[in-house]
Image (cartoon, rainbow, N blue to C red):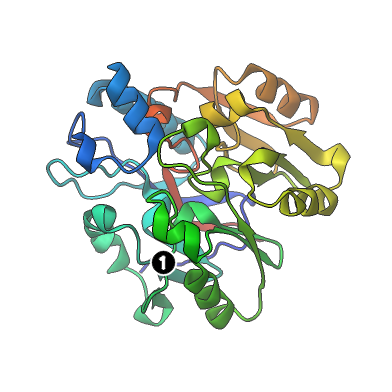
Amino acid sequence: MITLEVLDECSPLLEVILGSPESFGGIPKKDNIYDPKTLLNVKNGTFPSEEAIKKELDAFNDVLMGYDVKVHRPEVFKSVNQIFARDIGMVIGDQFLFPQILDKRSEEQIGIHFIINQIDVNKLLKVGGSARIEGGDVMPYRDYLFVGYSKKEDFDNYIVSRTNEAGVDFLIEHFKSWKIKPFELKKSDYNPYNNALHLDCCFQPIGKNKAIIYKAGFKNQSDAEWIINFFKPENILEINQEEMYDMNSNVFSLSHEIIVSELKFERLNQQLRDWNFIVEEIPFSETAKMEGLLRCATLPLRRSYA
């Protein structure tokens, strides 16, 4: 059986699902594209190859293994993109939340069924009804669950709106010991520079008291200001629009002291080192062309709280 425990984003990682690039389907047809960055790279002829993605995920896997993390990979199905494991499930506390996600992505969840089958059935929680949630929108932090979402008007009009108000209500109903703090995100189906696909595309807590944020990714600037005041301005790294597009907020914490980051994020990585983080730099810019980075490729199952 697999033991679950995730209370935050940054405690020492023990066990994780890492996405797989195997047989991900190659260049998608335009009617099968559901984010603007992928669409842009397909139009520009810069969509990444399976070989390039494999090199990047292999480098990530090597870092995880180097820190003695137990790594699971999804089962491979032909022409199913299983790179971004974050969105197809999530662990909150000691429960595995099996969400309702975008219909076009539902096949991805089949790849982790063999892992789900190793979890106590009493610890499995399936999202039902009209609730929609993707894991990139949900972040446990201390006694908070930070949640990115869209209200009805945006959820009904944008395919990049992945978590709705009913999803927020579901979390409120089922995780009563947590403070649910929702943030409405800015959406665009066609301009990746004006789109926060998930909360982790414009914000992420790191370490014990710090955070990365792109303020313009929030539909209401009062939400961005709430985050800055919560973490304190001196503990905030604000990224600009180009850095948001490159996904600087989508790094991955191995612990409070160790962060995996893209090697080209020079300003971010220097700031992290100035804050005394150990930064494990790996190439991941090809994967980023599909509007996902390091956090997106992972689904943590267990962190240490000893």
Disc 1 target residue? 132
Residue 130 at x, y percent in the picture: 38, 75
On screen, residue 306 versus residue 73, left or right, reads: right
Q: Is residue 101 above or below residue 227?
A: below
Q: Nearer the viewer, residue 109 or 150?
A: 150
What secondary structure is found at the residue carrying circle 1? loop
Dividing the picture into quadrants, the one containing residue 261 is: top right
Q: Is residue 118 above or below residue 57?
A: below
Q: Nearer the viewer, residue 192 or 280?
A: 192
Residue 79 at x, y percent in the picture: 15, 40
- Residue 213 makes an appearance in the image: no
- Residue 82 makes an appearance in the image: yes
Q: Nearer the viewer, residue 139 or 124?
A: 139
Q: Residue at x 36, y 71 (%)?
A: 119
Dividing the picture into quadrants, the one containing residue 210 is: top right
On screen, residue 109 versus residue 119, left or right, reads: left
Residue 305 at x, y percent in the picture: 65, 60
Farthest left residue in view: 78
Q: Residue at x 40, y 31 (%)?
A: 37
On screen, residue 54 versus residue 228, left or right, reads: left
Q: Residue at x 35, y 79 (%)?
A: 121
Q: Quadrant of the C terminus?
A: bottom right
Residue 147 at x, y percent in the picture: 59, 60
Q: Is residue 73 above or below residue 129?
A: above
Q: Quadrant of the N terminus?
A: bottom left
Q: Residue at x 47, y 33 (%)?
A: 192
On screen, residue 52 versus residue 172, left or right, reads: left
Q: Residues within 10 Å of mark 1 (few under 14, many from 20)?
A: many
Q: Amino acid at mark 1?
A: Arg
Number of numbered callouts drawn = 1
